[in-house]
Image (cartoon, rainbow, N blue to C red):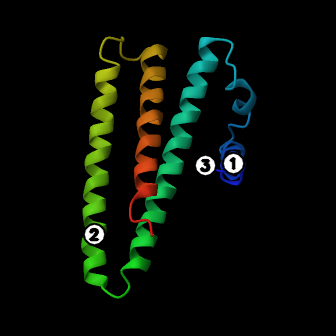
């Protein structure tokens, strides 16, 4: 990854935090001092990961539509497979995170923090996959 990409991602991350009313987290999440900050940061990480994933998904659909202009039916078939895959992946992600938090008491801050971190981690991996799908 080059520095321009990293800087653009940093700008987008900070912009999203500010737009979401979560700007306090940019400083606190770098070095959280207590469990409440860790919990709040886990929510921020999950929210941002979902936002970035949604953008990657929309970008992928746009790339496919553009690439398959000469064969729109084939493009539509490809998009339907991606939509099905995405729905299946969401179920898998949620199930995997349930496994990760299984031994933690539901409803506790530790449970929610762990689940948020799991979702953010898996969502970021999925975003990478979508970003690499159907590249020129």
Disc on res. 78 = 2
Q: Is residue 87 left or right of residue 4?
A: left
Residue underneath mark 1: 19
Residue for point 69% across, 30% down: 25
Q: Earlier in the sequence, mark 1 or mark 2?
A: 1
Relative side of 36 to 102, left or right: right
CB within 8 Å, label 3 to label 2: no
Mark 3 or mark 2: name the one nearer the start of the chain.
3
Residue at screen point 42% across, 17% down = 111
| Dot placed on the residue nearer the N-terminal end, 1 or 3 | 3
Quarter of the C terminus within the rendering: bottom left
* Kind of element beneath mark 1: helix
In space, the residues marked 1 and 2 are separated at their CA atoms by: 34 Å
The foreground one among 111 and 1 is: 1
Q: Is residue 22 above or below residue 78?
A: above
39 and 66: which is toward the camera: 66
Q: Can you give x and y, in whole percent of width and height, for residue 29 in the image?
A: 67, 26
* Residue 74 to residue 54: above or below: below
**What kind of element bears circle 2?**
helix
Mark 3 residue element: loop
Category of crowding for the residue at label 1, using alpha-carbon neighbours closer than 10 angstroms: few (below 14), some (14–19), many (at least 20): few
Q: Are marks 1 and 2 in contact (CB under 8 Å)?
A: no
Residue that mark 3 sits on: 1
Q: Nearer the viewer, mark 1 or mark 2?
A: 2
Q: Nearer the viewer, mark 3 or mark 2?
A: 3
Dot 2 crowding, Cα within 10 Å, few <14, some 14–19, many 20+: some
- Residue at 69% x, 20% y is 31
């Amino acid at each position: 990854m080059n520095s321009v990409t990293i800087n653009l991602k940093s700008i987008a991350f900070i912009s999203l935090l500010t737009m979401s009313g979560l700007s306090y987290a940019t400083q606190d999440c770098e070095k959280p001092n207590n469990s409440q900050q860790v919990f709040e940061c886990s929510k921020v990480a999950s929210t941002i990961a979902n936002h970035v994933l949604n953008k990657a998904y929309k970008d992928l659909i746009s790339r496919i539509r553009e690439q398959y202009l000469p064969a729109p039916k084939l493009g539509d078939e490809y998009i339907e497979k991606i939509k099905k895959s995405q729905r299946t992946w969401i179920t898998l992600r949620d199930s995997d995170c349930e496994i990760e938090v299984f031994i933690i008491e539901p409803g506790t801050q530790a449970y929610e923090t762990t689940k948020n971190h799991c979702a953010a981690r898996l969502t970021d991996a999925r975003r990478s996959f979508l970003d690499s799908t159907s590249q020129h």
